[in-house]
Image (spheres, rainbow, N blue to C red):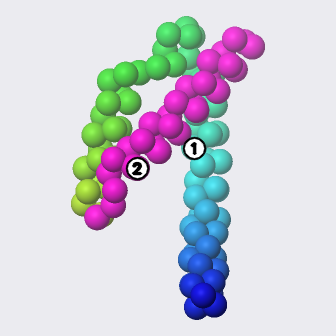
Amino acid sequence: MKNNSKEMKLIRKKIDQIDDKLLPLMVKRSKLVEKALSLKKRQNEIVDKKRINEISKKIVKKTSELGGNSKLLKKIWLSIIQNFIDYENQEFKKK
């Protein structure tokens, strides 16, 4: 049991290190989304289904190439996109 606990601690430490790299990238992404939103004149410009579809396909392809779980990562990516869409819609109404 102790060995499992030690291994779990190591895995969690590695996850935290990855999270420390992901967070600054997500902050950069969110600033770019805000910049893009400032260029949108109409609310219907927020959702670009063609672009979302392209991103989705790219994620599946790249994830497969990297040996990852493409179904899981596509779902996570689409969730990120949806959260930014929700944010943009909320902020657009404040304009």
What x and y, as percent, mark residue 35? Answer: 61, 31
The residue at which mark 2 appears reads as 73
- Confirm whether the magenta stretch covers residue 68: yes
Is residue 9 depicted above or below 87 in this figure? below
Q: Nearer the viewer, residue 70 or 90?
A: 70
The residue sitting at 25% across, 50% down in the picture is: 61
Q: Is residue 19 left or right of residue 44?
A: right
The residue sitting at 69% across, 11% down in the picture is: 93
Q: Quadrant of the N terminus?
A: bottom right
Q: Amino acid at mark 2?
A: Leu
Quadrant of residue 36 in the image?
Answer: top right
The residue at which mark 1 appears reads as 29
Q: Amino acid at mark 1?
A: Arg
The residue sitting at 33% across, 47% down in the picture is: 71
Quadrant of residue 49 in the image?
Answer: top left
Q: Is residue 43 left or right of residue 95?
A: left
What x and y, as percent, mark residue 68? Answer: 33, 61
Foreground mark, 2 or 1? Answer: 2
The residue sitting at 69% across, 20% down in the picture is: 91
Badge 1 element? helix
**Residue numbers of the magenta segment:** 67-95
Badge 2 element? helix
Q: Nearer the viewer, residue 15 or 23?
A: 15
Q: Quadrant of the C terminus?
A: top right
| Numbered-mark total | 2
Query: How far apart are the two marked residues, 2 and 1, measured between alpha carbons?
Result: 17 Å
